[in-house]
Amino acid sequence: MQQTGPHISAYGLDRLGLRNVNLAHWNYTAPALYEEALRRDEGHLSAGGPLVVRTGHHTGRSANDKFIVREAGSERDIWWGDINRPIEIEHFASLKRHMLAYMQGRDVYVQDCWAGADPAYRVGVRVITEAAWHSLFARNMFLPPAAAELEAFTPDFTIIDLPRFHAVPEVDGTRTEVFVLVNYAERLVLIGGTSYAGEIKK
């Protein structure tokens, strides 16, 4: 696996079962991600410098496509209903395998971040995506660790975000080709079928 970037974590992607990617871009800074997004034709610069991208036919959240894996360790703590809907662990495992296979031979972007500022309560989040601008969004939404923290960074949660990977509802147990799946046991979130990521404001 080829890797590049200012800070490559010793806690590698192979821990997730991700192998044979073309190039893993680790913890690029915001300016570098701007350049990557433009080089890859993911968007363009508007007047004043903001990066403008197209999210396709999804221009907002897909709230009805979010599911939580029903598993023994967390199911009693979740208020199941129209908002928190269950998905079977077998469907999650199948989608995870297919997403890992999809990433083989492709470039990926990795951001290691903190969710929360207080060291006593913050959570380490690793975001792996196929789009440079989604990596930029993650860097904006979460807090970048200090350089000294990155080399030994170990994620508490990992998010795999593949906008061009779509589910097959009849096979995968999802509502549509879009999915946001949360597995608390694996501390893993799978997102696919949508490029929407909100707004980046500086």
Image: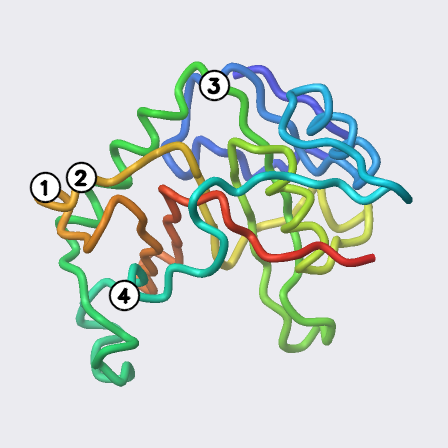
Image coordinates of residue 35 in percent, x first then y, are 78, 27
Q: CA distance from mark 1 to mark 3?
A: 25 Å
Q: Residue at image x 34%, y 31%?
A: 100
Circles 3, 2 touching at the beta carbon (< 8 Å) = no
Q: Is residue 27 left or right of residue 13?
A: right
Q: Which mark is residue 168?
A: 2
Q: Which mark is residue 163?
A: none
Can you say whether 45 is above or below 86 in the image?
above
Q: CA distance from mark 1 to mark 4?
A: 17 Å
Circles 4, 2 touching at the beta carbon (< 8 Å) = no
Mark nearer the N terminus (1 vs 4): 4
Type of amino acid under label 1: Val
Can you say whether 92 is above or below 40 in the image?
below
Mark nearer the N terminus (4 vs 2): 4
- Residue 8 vs residue 167, the one in the foreground: 167
Mark nearer the N terminus (1 vs 3): 3
Q: Quadrant of residue 184?
A: bottom left
For the residue carrying disc 1, how many other residues have a C-alpha within 10 Å: few (<14), some (14-19), or many (20+)?
Answer: few
Q: Which mark is residue 171?
A: 1
- Residue 135 vs residue 2, the one in the foreground: 135
Tally the marks. 4
